[in-house]
Image (spheres, rainbow, N blue to C red):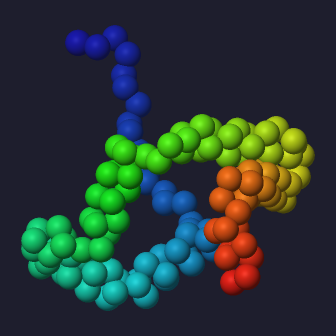
Amino acid sequence: LSLYSSPARETKYVENPQTELEEGVSRLRRAMEPYTAWCQMELTSSSKVKADRSLCSDFFSEGYEFLQKPPAGFYPRLGVIGFAGIIGLFLARGSKIKKLVYPAGLMGIATSMYYPQQAVAIAKVS
């Protein structure tokens, strides 16, 4: 026998109303549902043989082979370019725009020092 009586439990689940952002995301999901279902069907129906022959796997295999046998001086150049990006992050304290521009700019300058022909070709296209 209990000495104390337990209070009656009257719990009620109340769902929070959706915000405008949540409603917008749910509308977007419903609108994109046919496309995502189609993509899922395409991905599941494709065989592994097709995936092995894709350009993506060729790209990654070439990249892996390149990193296994890099040209002379590749890693020191990569280190200098990465260090320039870190210096850019250090100098870009404050503004979000600076955090985008300074590292990209310093890395671009460092890259153009080591690869001048490619830099000129990119500048001509731009």
Q: How many marks?
A: 0
Q: Nearer the viewer, residue 84 or 49?
A: 84
Quarter assignment of residue 89 = top right
Quarter assignment of residue 19 = bottom right
Residue 70 horizontal/vertical position (percent): 43, 46
- Any part of residue 62 in sight: yes
Q: Nearer the viewer, residue 49 or 65?
A: 65
Residue 113 horizontal/vertical position (percent): 74, 54
- Any part of residue 82 in sight: no
Would residue 14 appear left or right of 66 to someone viewing this image? right
Residue at 72% across, 59% down = 112
Quarter of the image with the C terminus is bottom right
Would residue 83 appear left or right of 50 to someone viewing this image? right
Residue 42 horizontal/vertical position (percent): 20, 82
Residue at 27% across, 65% down = 57
Residue at 72% across, 46% down = 85
Question: 22 above or below 102?
Answer: below
Residue at 28% across, 81% down = 39
Residue 98 horizontal/vertical position (percent): 86, 54
Would residue 38 appear left or right of 85 to someone viewing this image? left
Q: Nearer the viewer, residue 77 or 1?
A: 77
Quarter of the image with the N terminus is top left
Q: Nearer the viewer, residue 65 or 55?
A: 65
